[in-house]
Amino acid sequence: MATLINGKLLSEQLLVQQIKEAQALKDSGINPGLAVVLVGEDPASAIYVRNKEKACKTIGIESKSFRLPENTTQQELVDLIDRLNKDTSVHGILVQLPLPKHLDEAAVLKEIVPHKDVDGFHILNAGMLFRGQNSIVPCTPKGILYMLKSTGIQLEGKHAVIVNHSNVVGKPLAMLLLQENCTVTICHIYTKDLKEMTRQADILVVAIGNAKFFTGDMVKEGAVVVDVGINRLDGKVVGDVDMETVAPIASYITPVPGGVGKLTISMLMQNTLEAAWKAER
């Protein structure tokens, strides 16, 4: 039976360190600040923003929230980001995604100055990650790598299969795992014989938004399985992995809830603290 990689416990352990780090910043005369911008009334986004605000309060990061109406124009959003870029009390800027369809997401993210891009989505940060240079790393991939390393398993030489090719999860995670000397395969909707691919994985990371899609017959014996999916099924939050059939086969597995999601917020807080240190040096 697989050992659970407890994201809740790992985030609580990080929290202790982050509270100390925030206090050290304040002792140095730096009050770390995170600005979160939410456009529209998407319920899931609103929940994420509240969770981030709560984490900031617990750690000691000043949280500034900007809730804008659904009909906010591109220029209005860009003007706000410009003000936040110039605000020295703000060390990190996060624009909650997805944005309403009339807004150009790529253009908006490009407006955030790279050193305040605590989501790691700016094209400069993405390019630096691709080149293996020190950069701000997207929070979910950073959290996944942290979880994998927490198990103590050797990553070098492992075959990692990622079922997601987004700029948020799949692509940056592939870069991180390549830096750990894994062999990396990325799968997506056009992948032929997905089951054949996933059964080769020593490390399987899935994020497709399809409840309990990945079953035991799609997983290699002893694989480490990371479930990034968040779905509602019969009133419950479940992942993309069918825990009942996969857990007896895998060596390690992340639960949903209580897995990757917890570390995503922890890594956002870490990126903000690191940005605060760098901004004042």
Image: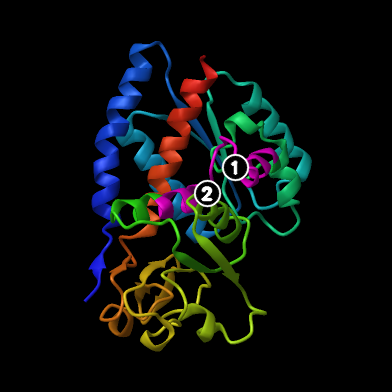
Q: Is residue 63 visible?
A: no
The residue furthest front is 157
- Label of residue 179 in the image: 2
**Is residue 122 shown in magenta?**
no
Say which of 197 and 10 sits in front: 197
Is 185 on the left or on the right of 251, as rendered? Answer: right
Which residues are drawn in magenta?
124-145
Residue displayed at 45% across by 52% down? 48
> What is the quadrant of residue 94 in the picture?
top right
Task: Give amino acid for label 1.
Answer: Gly
Count neighbours of disc 1 (C-alpha within 10 A) and say few if under 14, some if 14 to 19, many if 20 or more: few
Q: Main secondary structure of the magenta part?
A: helix
> What is the quadrant of residue 213 in the picture?
bottom left
> What is the quadrant of residue 62 in the picture?
top left
- Label of residue 154 in the image: none
Query: Picture coordinates of residue 75 (x, y %)?
Result: 78, 39
**Which element carries disc 2, helix, strand or loop?**
helix
Residue displayed at 66% across by 53% down? 70
CA distance separating discs 2 and 1: 7 Å
Residue carrying label 1:
132
Q: Is residue 119 visible?
A: yes
Say which of 142 and 88 sits in front: 142
**Is residue 126 shown in magenta?**
yes
Q: Quadrant of the N terminus?
A: bottom left
Residue displayed at 47% across by 78% down? 200
Circles 2, 1 touching at the beta carbon (< 8 Å): yes
Query: Picture coordinates of residue 106 (x, y %)?
Result: 73, 49
Say which of 18 and 56 sits in front: 18
